[in-house]
Image (cartoon, coloured by chain):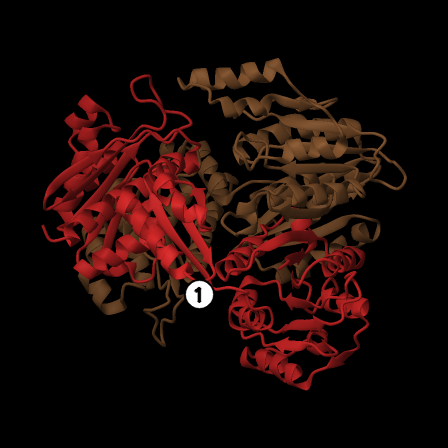
Chain colours: A brown, B red
Amino acid sequence: MNIEIINTGSELMLGRVLNTHQQWLCRQLADLGYVVTRQVAVADTADDIEQAVREALGRADFIVTTGGLGPTSDDITRDRIAALLGRKLTEDPAIVAHVESFFTKRKRTMPASTRVQAMVPDGAIVLHNAHGTAPGLALHISPNPFRPDGQPSWLVMLPGPPRELRPMFTDQVAPLLKEKLPLEAAFVCRTLRTVGIGESYLEERIAGPLKPLVDAGLELGYCAHTGAVDVRFVARGCGADADVAEAARIVYELAGEHIFGEGDAELEQVVLRKLEEKQQTLVLAESCTGGFIANRLTNVPGASAVFLAGLVTYSNGAKKQFLGVHADTLHDHGAVSEAVAREMAEGARKRTGVDYALAVTGIAGPGGGSPEKPVGTVFIALASASGTKVINPVNRYDRETFKYVTTTQALELLRRELTQKAVPA
Amino acid sequence: MNIEIINTGSELMLGRVLNTHQQWLCRQLADLGYVVTRQVAVADTADDIEQAVREALGRADFIVTTGGLGPTSDDITRDRIAALLGRKLTEDPAIVAHVESFFTKRKRTMPASTRVQAMVPDGAIVLHNAHGTAPGLALHISPNPFRPDGQPSWLVMLPGPPRELRPMFTDQVAPLLKEKLPLEAAFVCRTLRTVGIGESYLEERIAGPLKPLVDAGLELGYCAHTGAVDVRFVARGCGADADVAEAARIVYELAGEHIFGEGDAELEQVVLRKLEEKQQTLVLAESCTGGFIANRLTNVPGASAVFLAGLVTYSNGAKKQFLGVHADTLHDHGAVSEAVAREMAEGARKRTGVDYALAVTGIAGPGGGSPEKPVGTVFIALASASGTKVINPVNRYDRETFKYVTTTQALELLRRELTQKAVPA
């Protein structure tokens, strides 16, 4: 099966915005068992859109376009595709009513220009837009004059804003695709998310034991993100469920301590949910990560139930004032040292009375390094009722990557502590 | 002129990684006066790559491919393009020496597989890779058998890792492009970055006064980001410099208070540089933004000179303990209130002795709203020697967007304070 994506928008071609639609749509489709064969981006000019759509119709079974359905003069996707296919556009009263009510609810008058969004090409399925005004449109092109064999194609037009496109795809396009172009065989996809182990080391551990399954047809993929590696299994046909389950069992057995979750799990979510389950509380004391751990944790709804405070003690004065780090310790060991990390964590825990205090001090760079403590040096301390643990990684990256990798190591230190305790001794 | 980008990589088609090359390359080229007409992504399989390159050669004057130059079995871009063009591959001793020294410096033995990266197609210009092993390659295809008129094309292959691709493009590809395919007329591009004013309101203010310049050929573009809007001018031909300068003068006159910088300036950089210039210090007291302001500020190298501490006081207890907010104030007004924001900022400033303390309290959602204080309610307070200012925006977004927009408003409040003071009364 051949699936193509066409992203329209001059702002893409000028590099003013990042094309997040490509990754999101490709990922959603892959997880459903459909692989995108080609993605194209063109400016929102008539000829470019028409040429891209014409070429895709000549090859693909299922085509998704994004953008160009709105009310302004550069929104021309609907019109050009209708013209290319010779389909008449007619105003749909139900869409007019939806657009009117959208403005009424917001106490705004409906600009006349927005009415164009209610125009529907002959034979199109209208995809309701619960988060905006422009509906999506799905067209079945059968026979398809652009394919040599006349084979039919589906063409789905989606609005550009992600918060409109994403629920429309999930709720309406994915079911349509599964109904109209069902996979020929069972499809199972499972992703295990690991942290704290490099891609090649992980492969060394698991590739051998997985080989019989891979030889029998299991697809095994690695995807290295900053500070984390995903392992993805795909199996098709009968026995797919059992093969994927067996593969996952092997990886849990050989590298289970590194697996923090599956699918779209995020490390900060996992940590927060574990604290919630145990009804335990957390305080952070961050120096070199500059509030990034707090920022990641507070992206998770409900964080306030367990995360009480984060002290971004960037200066020595702040370390003394808010955490009770001793001037002598700072003087004797330096701000980036095991002793200071330990005092930061223990001070934060003692002063707030929480279950866990996580502290980080290090040298993010580009300046501030020395021969004994080069840029990238980090001390991470975790204080709890069972004492204080300190780890000392060296993270040689650019400043922002350094901060991200370090926050991940800190969250992972806490996750392991929480996971250990969950297992009865 | 017709420029196309071809991104290769199965991980792109599976949605496992975000295609940042598209935006980066399109932006670089646009700022040099070259507009990309089409971008295509395909899997790293031989047929897909060959078809995409063949099509691009049939249309484009300049083609950039990314990825597929490395040492593993799925790196096939160089081989397939050489085969398509009938160019013989020969090992280049200088590249072999570079790859060997790359491994020697890292005290690792050179895997035999990496030697393939030294293979160069006949007639190719080798683009040195200062940050990795695989060089880039530039080919002049003249005559071009894939274009109906035989017009020549340039085809440039770049390695996939961004930290290898980006300097190679800037240092070697951009000069090559400017030399081989010079713009026919002078080209000037200038971007003004604004914050705190919506795209349509900004347009209302400036579009009329800019109309004579636009009618005379100036290109005017708006690009709305979350919480910020860029205004971009492009002019070509003689008088381009003067036209762009006049357009910028008009926008500074009509909306100058909203302009925080130009080009790639970031608001957090601008704020930090202004504090540095004035040798003044800052402390943050964040509740609903959860450390995001601190995180943005500490992404800027040198932040530690002016940013002393950030207190992420997520709980009421932390607000009392670390900022001295009164229990009565919390009880009478609630944690999300002007009174609490004021006490947070004033308490942080008093306790640390800094010049500026910026405090934020609000309801990020999805839970926690009430009829009087709906989700999105925010109070931002700035305490300084001249007193305390409080603003009260309502930011109705998803949780992460809420946090980002709120951090931008807080930084902008501080920027305006710093900018006002810079002007002698």
The residue where tag 1 is placed is: A394
Q: Is residue B92 above or below residue A386?
A: below
Which SS class for mark 1?
loop
Residue A396 visible = yes
The answer to which of B395 and A312 lies nearer the viewer is B395
Report if residue A358 is visible in the image.
no
Q: In front here: A424 or A407? A: A407
Q: Amino acid at mark 1?
A: Val
Residue B52, position in %: x, y? 74, 56
Residue B263, given in percent of the width and then of the height, sits at 39, 56
- From the viewer's perspective, is B5 left or right of A373? right
* Left or right: A291, with B415 as reference point: right
Q: Quadrant of the N terminus of chain A?
A: top right
Closest to the observer, B335 or B89: B89
Give the residue at the far right of this rendering. Answer: A149
Q: Nearer the viewer, residue A144 or A138?
A: A144
Crowding near the residue tagged with mark 1, few <14, some 14–19, many ≥20 C-alpha atoms within 10 Å? some
Give the side of residue A57 with respect to residue A324, left or right.
right
Say above or below: A102 vs B377. Answer: above
Task: Classify A252 as above or below B52.
Answer: above
Q: Which residue appears at 78% of the width and 48% of the height?
A: A218
Quadrant assignment, res B190: bottom left
Chain of the residue displaying label 1: A
Number of numbered markers:
1
Residue B50: x, y in percent?
78, 60
Q: Residue at x 61, y 13 (%)?
A: A93
Q: Position of residue A131 (x, y in %)?
A: 52, 25
Q: Which residue shows up at 10% across the image and 44% down it?
A: B386
